[in-house]
């Protein structure tokens, strides 16, 4: 087993552990941390599989952007006293079986499609040219959308002026 294989297995273990932590945790902060572990595992898998640009984008956009946005929204939520936000969730066997069935269905359908694909090598300069050329408007609109989501959270938390 090569070093790349060991790092890939570690990344996959981080992904599975982070996903399980996100699904099973009741404390919201632990959920966010588990989601961060999952997203960093995905970035590590991209890095090992030869896509460093996608790995860096994963860290910047999801870990650096979305998780910070979630944590910022959690800090702004008003709570009484020292209570921490807790999610009351039920984990039942039916939902787990449905998830497993969807996973098997996707695996059966997507594995032949993935085996038939041919990887395409794209230089980082080409991606930058697209993002800063014809994709600039869409790239900036995504930033505006994230800002609008943050403002919507603020309005919801403050009560939306219904007083």
Image: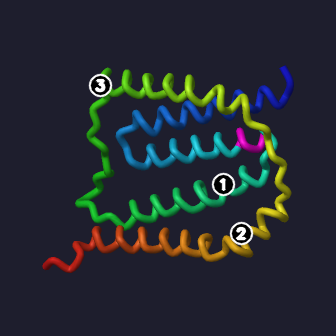
Residue on which disc 2 sits: 131
Prevailing secondary structure class for the magenta stretch in the rendered image:
helix
Earlier-in-chain disc, 3 versus 2: 3
Residue under label 3, please give it.
Answer: 92
Image quarter (top left, top right, bottom left or bottom right) of the C terminus = bottom left
* Image position of 48 with respect to 128: above or below: above
User: Tag 1 or tag 3, which sits nearer the N-term?
Assistant: 1
Foreground of the two, 62 or 80 = 62
Whole-percent x and y of residue 132?
Answer: 73, 74
Q: Residues within 10 Å of mark 1 (few under 14, many from 20)?
A: some
Residue under label 1: 59
Q: Nearer the viewer, mark 3 or mark 2?
A: 2
Q: Nearer the viewer, residue 113 or 6?
A: 113
Give the alpha-carbon distance from disc 3 to disc 2, as whole Å.
44 Å
Spatial separation of the CA atoms under disc 1 and disc 2: 17 Å
Identity of the residue drawn at 77% across and 27% down: 6
At which x and y percent is residue 147?
47, 73
Q: In this view, does 141 lie to the left or right of 113?
A: left
Give the residue displayed 31% in from the left and 29% down from the top: 91
Residues at marks 3 and 1 touching, judged by CB atoms closer than 8 Å: no
* Numbered disc 1: secondary structure: helix
| Element carrying mark 3 | loop
Q: Does the magenta stretch include residue 47?
A: yes
Q: In the rendering, at what x and y percent does residue 64 appear?
A: 60, 60
The location of residue 159, given as percent across then percent down, is 22, 72
Displayed quadrant of residue 74: bottom left
Q: Give the range drawn in magenta.
A: 44-48
Check the image and tell me how it is coloured.
rainbow
């Amino acid at each position: 087993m090569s070093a790349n294989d060991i790092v890939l297995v570690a990344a996959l273990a981080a992904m599975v552990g982070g996903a399980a932590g996100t699904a099973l945790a009741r404390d919201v902060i632990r959920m966010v941390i588990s989601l961060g572990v999952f997203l960093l595992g995905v970035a590590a898998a991209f890095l090992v599989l030869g896509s460093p640009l996608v790995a860096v984008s994963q860290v910047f956009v999801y870990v650096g952007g979305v998780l910070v946005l979630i944590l910022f929204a959690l800090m702004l939520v008003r709570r009484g006293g020292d209570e921490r936000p807790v999610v009351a969730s039920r984990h039942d066997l039916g939902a787990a079986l449905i998830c497993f069935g969807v996973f098997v269905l996707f695996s059966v359908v997507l594995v032949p499609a993935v085996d038939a694909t041919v990887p395409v090598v794209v230089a980082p300069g080409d991606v930058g040219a697209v993002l800063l050329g014809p994709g600039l408007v869409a790239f900036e609109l995504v930033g505006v959308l994230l800002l609008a989501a943050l403002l919507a959270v603020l309005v919801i938390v403050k009560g939306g002026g219904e007083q």
